[in-house]
Image (tube, rainbow, N blue to C red):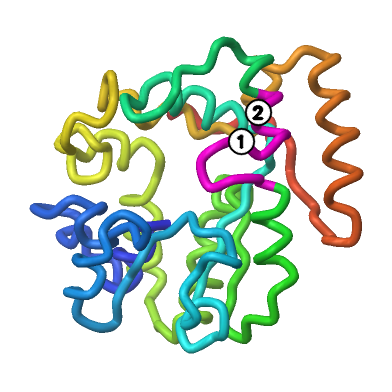
């Protein structure tokens, strides 16, 4: 989404991704407040904040918010590998142990269940929900939804450029987006981009783990109207 936002505002001109890293152009609110304050408007800001900790401008609607959701089983796998690679995170003992702490909400930014509930139930008048799986299935359609939400008018050629330069492969190979030029935060910065697949959880969860999580998920998301895609066949190679 960081890269998509930059490309949409640059009307598909991929030169916006050159020279300055994405994490500098779209700084993290919880980590880079001084850089956020230095941005010229319109500001593109990134955050993992739960709704209850977000600034009032994000809670009340004076700023536009795009909330990206992903099926939680793939989030668990992604965060598990992230924690194994990140030098600033505690190394998970094993996948079972990590699954337990995730369900208990003892991970970065707290409980996923509370996080998505907070943003799904808020009354923010300028909030767009985007599913990661929809970005994988039909990225041009997502870009068009974003443009409508942001009040941007892009030609089909410009949308094609946005899609091309925000693909998983393009971002993984671009040193300004793949964290290879970032400070030493990871055991291997190149591994920041892993697979980006929908349904990779099936390569990590046992049947028992999957059934256990399904039961917890059903209990803790009642009434939210969530409809995740848990797997996609024949996904393009990364």
Viewer-side residue, 174 vs 184: 184
Q: Residue at x 50, y 77 (%)?
A: 58
Percent of width and height locating residue 177 = 26, 44
Res 11 → quadrant: bottom left
Res 130 → quadrant: bottom right
Category of crowding for the residue at label 1, using alpha-carbon neighbours closer than 10 angstroms: few (below 14), some (14–19), many (at least 20): few
* Total marks placed: 2
In the shown orientation, is residue 209 left or right of residue 233? right
Q: Residue at x 83, y 14 (%)?
A: 207
Percent of width and height locating residue 22 = 24, 53
Q: Secondary structure at mark 1?
A: loop
Q: Residue at x 27, y 37 (%)?
A: 178
Q: What is the span of residues highlighted in magenta in the rendered image?
A: 99-112
Magenta includes 105? yes
Category of crowding for the residue at label 2, using alpha-carbon neighbours closer than 10 angstroms: few (below 14), some (14–19), many (at least 20): some
Percent of width and height locating residue 219 = 91, 44
Residue furthest out toward the left: 19
Residue with the mark numbered 2 = 101
State which quarter of the image contains the N terminus.
bottom left
Percent of width and height locating residue 45 = 35, 67
- Tell me if label 2 and label 1 are in contact, CB under 8 Å: yes
Query: Nearer the N terminus, badge 2 or badge 1?
Result: 2
Residue with the mark numbered 1 = 106
Viewer-side residue, 91 vs 28: 91
Magenta includes 141? no
In the shown orientation, is residue 23 left or right of residue 129? left
In the shown orientation, is residue 181 left or right of residue 9? left
Viewer-side residue, 146 vs 121: 121
Res 68 → quadrant: bottom right
Q: Secondary structure at mark 2?
A: helix
């Amino acid at each position: 989404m960081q890269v998509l936002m930059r490309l949409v505002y640059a009307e598909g001109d991929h030169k916006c991704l050159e020279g300055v890293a994405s994490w500098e152009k779209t700084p993290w609110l919880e980590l880079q407040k001084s850089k956020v304050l230095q941005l010229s408007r319109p500001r593109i800001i990134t955050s993992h904040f739960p709704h209850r900790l977000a600034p009032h401008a994000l809670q009340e609607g004076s700023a536009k918010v795009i909330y990206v959701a992903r099926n939680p089983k793939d989030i668990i796998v992604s965060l598990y590998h992230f924690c194994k690679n990140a030098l600033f995170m505690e190394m998970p003992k094993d996948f079972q142990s990590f699954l337990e702490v995730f369900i208990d909400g003892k991970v970065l930014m707290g409980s996923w269940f509370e996080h998505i509930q907070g943003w799904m139930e808020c009354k923010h008048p300028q909030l767009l929900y985007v599913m990661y799986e929809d970005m994988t299935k039909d990225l041009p359609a997502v870009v068009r939804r974003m443009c409508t939400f942001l009040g941007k008018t892009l030609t089909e050629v410009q949308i094609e450029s946005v899609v091309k330069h925000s693909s998983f492969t393009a971002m993984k190979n671009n040193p300004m987006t793949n964290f290879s030029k970032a400070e030493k935060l990871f055991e291997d910065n190149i591994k920041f981009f892993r697979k980006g697949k929908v349904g990779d959880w099936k390569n990590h969860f046992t049947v028992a783990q999957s059934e256990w999580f399904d039961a917890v998920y059903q209990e803790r998301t009642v009434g939210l109207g969530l409809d995740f895609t848990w797997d996609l066949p024949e996904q393009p190679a990364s």
